[in-house]
Structures are given as structure tokens and as C-alpha cells.
Image (spheres, coloured by chain):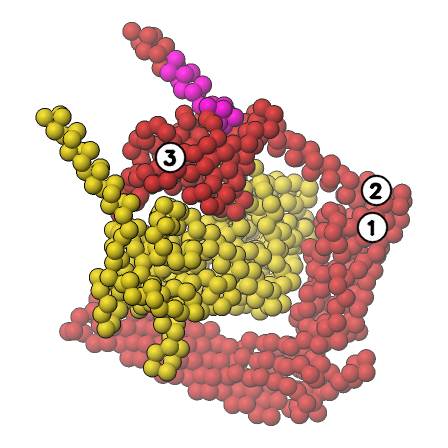
Chain colours: A red, B yellow
């Protein structure tokens, strides 16, 4: 008895597996023409079908033995084209511009979107045959999509292998591995006119091989990976075809950036070099603001209901000296901590550019609600004081914002029997001296 | 009995047939005598109820330009039943006549009419967006509920489905223009312009994207890094020229990692086992709806969750290269973000390379701290996962 049951199960599984035909076979059962439109109506999560008053023209394009394209002429006025997902063994027809997908099963054409997480979301079914309820139609479609995917494996694997072979061929042609290098040319993608702290300069590499062939990095339109190169830099960092100028002028010796590049596979280390002066034509921004205080977290172990105080903005002295660099006036800016006297940063900027400084106090954290009284808001931090001195002080363009932080709002009382927390005090604005 | 039913059915069909062919009558014939510069004013008939309605375009009121559509029901009254506002920019730039009114501030209180053909308006609802001072955004899921037609000869052509198709077409066209305009606006920002289609890296997620600003560039880029200490946080984010949800709707996202000639990717590993599927979640383009991707971590300590968050596909690659790692050396680590469907990668959406530095601190993190033998290193923990 058990063996008969197993046999029937196996037979059903076999028939089930074979009942899923690819779209070349499914579309073969249909003829291009007008189809009755069954539209899905949704009301609070309930779905039903309603037949539209007009039929829509739908056509199928066959190339050789395969149906390559389905054209849905929506309402007879909008032509939508859908291409086969896997031409030799299609499961559906997809659009490049929308999430709509078309699949035909047993002479019904499903117009739907699809998520790997939630399955099909049917919008229309075009069919001359009777439509079942939404859940059954969705189940039919989801089952088809799941089982056809398994059947697509061979064709899909073949396509992936073909694509991988193409990619490997391209990689082989463009890698520097095993190639003899005649020379390397390092060039900016576009010649930068304004180079200052933190500027990003796209720099490409052209490699001329001993056979005269020229290989280029992606940013110059080629396919040679950036990771085939090693580099030595001065005045910043280089990675992925971008040179990022340093954030501090002390890291830019000679006020220029330099880069030398070679193939990591080249024992001779044939180098290409590039250098450009830094003209400091770029605004410089510093943030010395204090952090905001954390809000209270009533009912959480290890936390208080009171908001924490915001931190004060850092008070700094800024010493400015005007120097001449390549015939242009540049302000050298040295920023020191007002209390420790330690140098925090050094920068240079052309006198036409602006030094932006934020030294705001952090906001106080809000008090939270607990089981009784509300927590108090934290106090806002004070704005940092900023003093600008030196021969270049008058020519320095600057924008300084050093406001006091806002006090946190007191937390609400749990009930009227308790008290609302106190609001935190606002921080004082910092002083700017010049 | 059956005979009587048949006769009655025929009679009903005859009566309704006459009614369908007959000219519809309404109370707003006089409106057809009026002219306006948009050619709207007149008597319209509802497709669903065949009743007459009055549409009147009003350009000025009380000395002010108002550009309103006044809608009358049943009969002409001193005040219209509804006053709908023209979205002027759509008309001025695209000649699209879209009028809207918020009956209430909630999404269900939104009414919109859009001209789909001269003298044919689609009535539209949406249920996603609440009042924002203008019409529902173009991303709203617009549903045509009825059609109003001035010339009865067009009744055969226009039904709800036809109007819906035309509305989708018009909105898609406006949306394309909007996306292009937004991209041009983003390109004015140097940080975006220099990093578009790239993956950028930082030691803290908030150096990549300010919390609550996925649709706005609110960081200076000063803290984007070209080198990261493997002992610390390693975060990254992609910049897209167009949001993947718009350009590649209904697809997945795959992330590939490459280091020292070896590659791993999330999708391949996710399909290896249930354990991997639990650790590597599916990413869908619908959740990549901005020009900045959500910030992601190769590995980071997440303050909010009070634990380390790791991308297991990235950790697998580091594990594959563990024998090569030497203290003081840096290693190029490339991240590529692909659009993905049915097990195959599509276009590369963004790519970036960072140098990962294997420091003393990194060695302790990954190989374990000899002074704390009770705490396992990342590689030992990962090996445990692989062995399970």
C-alpha cells in the first residue's frame, strides 16, 4: 500500500515538473490579437478581478524558434515592449523601465510585478478563459516562477559561463599581469584649475606595452583595474583613480602633489609620474562644535531619565600670515587650542577663498518620561571663542558660527500627579575677536 | 416562466440600448457657450453614471490670478462643489493640465483631475501621501476612478483603463523630467559630482551620510577615507546617478568584494545554505530609493545595537586571504554594487577601492588577543560559523 502511495507521489511530482513549460512553448499556444482584460481590484487587502470594457491588442515576436518579445498595447494607446529574460528558455518577459513582468501560463497572460520575498503581485490577466480567484491565480503564477527557475538552470548557467568567459577574456587583455611595459603616463582626467585642501582629482593611467598597445584605466575609458598598480604619493592619498589632497597643509611638502605609479607585476618598476602645484583655491572648513548631549532614556538599565549636557564648542586661536605662492596671495592659517596651546590644524587658502569655522555648543539632551516625574533637559554647551590674529587677519575671508547650544526639553510627567522635568539652560554664544 | 424572462431581458436590453445611443442631457449646456484660454470650460459627462457636470476654468478672482477649475454637480450654483488648483509648472513646461484639491489633509482626501485628451479628464485618487501644500508627488500610486468627457462621441474611446494608461504615460514623462532635473541639481555638489557611480569609505557611518538625510548630501566628504585600519570600523556607501529603485525597478542588489585576486559576493553566498541566508539578507532596489545608498559596513561596532555588525560576504573574503595578511601592509579592497536578477548580475551601479591596513590592532581583532585568550578573534568566530 505504502509503495503504491509513493509511486503515485513520484508520478505526480514527475507530471508536475513537466507541466511547467517555458515561455517559448506557452506563447506558442497563443495567437497575437485582442485579449479580454481582467483587472485586479484591491480593497483593504481583498483582491478580485473586474473585466475591462475594451480588449487590448497583444502581440508576440518570434525569432527562429524563440519568442523574443511581447508587446502589450495598453488600452490600445500605449505600446509596452517586454523582452525575454533568458532567450533560450524564458520564464518571463521584462521591461527595462518598469517593474512589470509578463508570463503566459495555459493561455492566460499575467501582467504583474515580482519580488523574491513576496512573489507575484498581479495587475491584470489577459485571457479568453475563465479567471479563478486572486489567491489561486497568484499561487499558479508563484509556483510556475519557482519551478521554472529550476528548469532554467542549464541555460542560465550556460549564459553565466559565456558572460564570465567574455569578462575573463577582457580581464586577460587588459591586466598588466604578464605584460612587458614600455612606459607609463599618468594624466589627470580633466586638468584641475583649483586645487586646495581635500580636492579630489581624478587621475588615470595609460600604459604603453612593448608591442605598442596602450592600456588605460577605467576613468580614461579603458578596462585596466586600478588594483594592478602600486603608487607613491606626496600631498594626499591615491586610491581607485582618485587623488585626494591632504586635509592639512603640513602634509603637502613644497605645496604640490606628486604621484608615481607602477605595475605591481613589473619587477623593473617602470614608473609614470605626475605632479601639480597646489594653488589652495578652495574654501576650507573646520568643525570644532561640541557634541550634543544624549537624551534621557527612562526605563533603560544604565541610563538616567535626565538629558545630558551638550559639550562646549572648542575655543581656538587662529594665526594668519599672508604669503606669496606662485605669484598669488595665500593666507597661511595656524589653528591652536586656546587652552592647551597645541596646534590643531594648519591650512593655506588663496585670499579669495573662505575659512569656514563652526564652533557651536552642543544641544542639551531632552529629558525622558519615566514612571513618575519627567527627566530634566541637559544644558546647551557654550559656543567656542575664536580669536584671529596675524598679518593676514585683515585679508582673511572667514565665516565663523559659534552659537550656544539649545537646552534640552524637560521630559513629560507620567501623569498629572507628577511634575514635568526642567528645561535645560541654553549655552552662551562664543566671542569672535579679530 | 423561462419565456417571460427572455422577453423581459430583451425589453431591458432594448431600452438600455436606446438609452446608450441617445444623446445624454445635463444641466450645464450653457457652459459650452463659454470659452477660456485652456479650452476646458463646458459640460462634461461622467463615464460611470452618465450624468452631466459643469467644468469651468477660472483664471482670475478678486484681482488675483488663481488658475482654478470649478466643478459643479447637479445644477449651476453660486459656488462650485469643488475648486481645484492648477499645477502651474506642469502646464507651463509640459502643457499638462493637472488640477488638485485636498478635501482633507489625509491621503484619502485627495482629488485630482488630469486632462488625458482634449475635453477628457481622468478623475484620480491616491492613498499614499498626505497633504504637502501641492499636488500628490509624482511617485504616488495614482488610480483613475472615473472619466469625464465633454464630447459624447469620445465615450466609446475613453474608459477607466484607457485613461489609466494615459495617466501613467503622462506621469512617467513628468517623472523622467523631474529625475533629470534632480540629477542636474545633485551634480552641482562637488562631493556628489566627483563620487557619482562610486563607492566611498569612512571609519564612521555618519561621516558618509548624516542620519535622516538619505535624500540630501549633508556631509562634507572630508572624512571619506582612501585607507582604513582593519582594526576599526570599515564603512562604505555608494553614490548613484539615478536612484536604483527608479532605474532598475523590481530587481535585487548584489555586492561583490575583491581583494588580492579573490572575490566573494552576497548573492552567491546567500544561496549556499540556510545559515548563510540568515546572515546575508536579500537587498532589493526598491529599498535603494535615493542617490545615496544606505550606509553599509564591512565590519563596524554598532553603538545602537551594542554589537559588531559585519557583512559576512566581506568577512569571507578577508578569511580567504587570512594567510596573506601581514602587520603593517595595506591591501586593495574593492567593492562593486550590482543590480541583480535571478542569480545574474546586471549593470555595475557603483565601484570603489579602499586600502585596508592590517595593523597590530587589526591583528588582535582578527586573530585574537594573546593577552585575552578567552575572547575569540573574528577569524575564529567566522570559522565556527563555517563549521556549523
Q: Which residue is drawn at 70% across and 60% down?
A: A242
Residue B89 higher or lower than A146, as above or below: below
Dot in front, 1 or 3: 3
Q: Can residue A407 be seen in this view?
A: yes
- The chain letter under disc 3 is A
Judge whether residue A116 can be spotted in this image: no
Which residue position is annotated with label 2?
A179
Provide the residue span drawn in magenta: A11-29
Q: Nearer the viewer, residue A68 or B374?
A: A68
| Circle 2 crowding by C-alpha within 10 Å: few under 14, some 14–19, many from 20 | some
In the image, A296 versus B334, the foreground residue is B334
Label 2 near label 1: C-beta < 8 Å? yes
Q: Which residue is drawn at 53% across and 60% down?
A: B177
Q: Which quarter of the image is occupied by the N terminus of chain B?
A: top left
**Disc on the earlier residue, 1 or 3:** 3
Q: Do labels 1 and 3 share a chain?
A: yes
Residue A36, numbered label = 3
Chain hosting mark 1: A
Q: Distance between the residues labelled 3 and 2?
A: 63 Å
Alpha-carbon neighbours of circle 3 within 10 Å: few (<14), some, or many (≥20)?
Answer: some
Identify which residue, B334 or B159, lies in the foreground. B159
Amino acid at each position: 500500500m505504502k509503495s503504491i502511495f509513493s509511486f503515485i507521489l513520484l508520478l505526480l511530482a514527475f507530471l508536475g515538473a513537466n507541466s511547467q513549460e517555458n515561455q517559448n512553448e506557452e506563447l506558442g499556444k497563443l495567437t497575437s490579437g485582442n485579449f479580454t482584460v481582467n483587472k485586479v481590484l484591491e480593497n483593504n487587502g481583498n483582491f478580485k478581478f473586474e473585466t475591462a470594457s475594451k480588449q487590448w491588442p497583444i502581440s508576440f515576436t518570434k525569432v527562429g524558434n524563440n519568442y523574443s518579445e511581447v508587446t502589450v498595447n495598453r488600452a490600445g494607446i500605449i505600446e509596452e515592449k517586454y523582452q525575454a529574460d533568458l532567450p533560450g528558455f524564458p520564464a518571463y518577459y521584462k521591461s527595462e523601465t518598469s517593474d512589470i513582468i509578463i508570463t503566459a501560463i495555459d493561455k492566460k497572460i499575467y501582467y504583474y510585478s515580482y519580488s523574491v520575498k513576496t512573489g507575484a503581485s498581479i495587475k491584470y490577466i489577459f485571457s479568453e478563459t475563465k479567471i479563478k480567484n486572486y489567491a489561486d491565480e497568484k499561487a499558479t503564477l508563484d509556483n510556475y516562477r519557482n519551478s521554472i527557475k529550476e528548469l532554467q538552470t542549464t541555460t542560465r548557467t550556460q549564459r553565466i559561463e559565456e558572460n564570465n568567459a567574455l569578462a575573463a577574456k577582457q580581464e586577460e587583455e587588459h591586466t598588466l599581469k604578464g605584460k612587458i611595459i614600455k612606459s607609463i603616463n599618468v594624466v589627470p582626467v580633466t586638468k584641475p584649475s583649483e586645487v586646495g585642501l581635500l580636492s579630489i582629482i581624478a587621475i588615470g593611467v595609460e600604459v604603453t606595452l612593448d608591442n605598442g598597445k596602450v592600456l588605460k584605466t577605467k576613468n580614461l575609458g579603458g578596462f585596466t583595474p586600478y588594483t594592478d598598480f602600486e603608487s607613491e604619493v606626496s600631498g594626499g592619498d591615491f586610491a581607485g583613480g582618485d587623488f585626494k589632497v591632504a586635509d592639512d597643509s603640513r602634509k603637502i611638502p613644497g605645496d604640490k602633489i606628486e604621484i608615481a605609479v607602477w605595475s605591481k607585476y613589473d619587477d623593473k618598476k617602470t614608473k609614470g609620474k605626475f605632479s601639480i602645484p597646489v594653488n589652495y583655491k578652495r574654501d576650507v572648513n573646520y568643525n570644532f562644535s561640541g557634541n550634543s548631549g544624549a537624551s534621557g532614556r527612562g526605563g533603560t538599565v544604565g541610563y538616567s531619565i535626565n538629558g545630558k549636557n551638550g559639550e562646549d564648542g572648542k575655543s581656538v586661536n587662529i594665526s594668519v600670515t599672508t604669503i606669496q605662492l606662485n605669484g598669488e596671495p595665500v593666507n597661511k592659517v595656524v589653528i591652536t587650542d586656546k587652552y592647551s596651546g597645541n596646534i590643531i590644524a594648519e591650512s593655506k587658502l588663496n585670499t579669495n577663498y573662505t575659512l569656514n569655522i563652526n564652533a557651536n555648543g552642543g544641544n542639551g539632551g531632552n529629558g525622558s518620561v519615566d514612571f513618575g516625574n519627567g527627566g530634566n533637559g541637559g544644558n546647551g554647551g557654550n559656543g567656542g571663542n575664536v580669536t584671529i590674529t596675524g598679518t593676514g587677519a585683515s585679508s582673511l575671508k572667514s565665516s565663523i558660527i559659534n552659537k550656544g547650544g539649545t537646552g534640552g526639553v524637560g521630559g513629560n510627567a507620567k501623569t498629572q500627579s507628577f511634575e514635568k522635568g526642567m528645561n535645560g539652560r541654553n549655552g552662551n554664544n562664543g566671542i569672535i575677536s579679530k | 416562466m423561462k419565456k417571460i424572462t427572455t422577453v423581459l431581458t430583451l425589453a431591458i436590453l432594448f431600452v438600455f440600448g436606446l438609452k446608450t445611443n441617445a444623446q445624454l442631457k445635463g444641466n450645464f449646456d450653457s457652459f459650452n457657450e463659454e470659452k477660456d484660454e485652456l479650452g476646458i470650460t463646458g459640460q462634461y459627462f461622467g463615464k460611470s453614471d452618465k450624468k452631466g457636470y459643469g467644468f469651468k476654468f477660472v483664471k482670475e478672482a478678486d484681482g488675483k490670478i488663481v488658475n482654478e477649475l470649478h466643478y459643479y454637480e447637479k445644477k449651476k450654483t453660486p459656488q462650485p462643489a469643488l475648486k481645484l488648483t492648477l499645477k502651474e509648472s506642469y502646464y507651463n513646461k509640459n502643457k499638462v493640465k493637472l488640477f488638485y484639491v485636498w478635501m482633507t489633509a489625509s491621503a484619502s482626501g485627495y482629488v485630482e483631475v488630469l486632462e488625458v485628451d482634449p475635453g477628457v479628464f481622468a478623475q484620480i485618487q491616491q492613498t499614499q501621501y498626505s497633504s504637502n501644500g501641492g499636488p500628490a508627488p509624482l511617485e504616488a500610486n495614482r488610480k483613475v476612478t472615473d472619466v469625464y468627457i465633454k464630447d459624447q462621441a469620445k465615450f466609446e474611446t475613453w474608459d477607466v483603463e484607457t485613461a489609466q494608461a494615459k495617466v501613467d504615460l503622462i506621469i512617467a514623462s513628468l517623472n523622467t523630467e523631474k529625475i533629470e532635473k534632480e540629477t542636474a541639481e545633485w551634480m552641482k555638489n562637488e562631493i556628489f559630482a566627483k563620487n557619482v557611480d562610486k563607492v566611498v569609505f569612512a571609519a564612521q557611518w555618519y561621516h558618509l551620510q548624516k542620519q535622516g538625510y538619505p535624500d540630501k548630501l549633508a556631509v562634507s566628504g572630508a572624512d571619506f577615507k582612501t585607507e582604513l585600519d582593519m582594526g576599526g570600523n570599515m564603512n562604505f556607501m555608494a553614490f548613484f546617478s539615478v536612484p536604483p529603485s527608479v532605474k532598475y525597478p523590481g530587481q535585487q542588489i548584489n555586492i561583490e568584494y575583491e581583494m588580492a585576486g579573490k572575490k566573494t559576493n552576497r548573492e552567491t553566498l546567500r544561496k549556499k545554505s540556510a545559515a548563510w541566508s540568515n546572515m546575508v539578507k536579500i537587498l532589493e532596489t526598491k529599498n535603494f530609493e535615493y542617490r545615496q545608498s544606505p550606509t553599509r559596513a564591512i565590519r563596524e561596532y554598532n553603538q545602537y545595537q551594542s554589537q559588531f555588525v559585519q557583512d559576512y560576504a566581506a568577512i569571507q573574503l578577508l578569511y580567504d586571504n587570512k594567510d596573506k595578511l601581514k602587520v603593517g601592509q595595506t591591501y586593495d579592497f574593492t567593492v562593486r554594487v550590482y543590480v541583480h536578477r535571478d542569480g545574474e548580475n546586471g549593470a555595475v551601479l557603483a565601484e570603489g577601492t579602499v586600502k585596508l591596513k592590517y595593523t597590530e590592532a587589526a591583528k588582535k581583532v582578527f586573530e585574537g588577543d594573546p593577552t585575552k585568550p578567552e575572547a575569540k578573534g573574528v577569524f575564529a568566530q567566522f570559522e565556527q560559523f563555517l563549521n556549523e
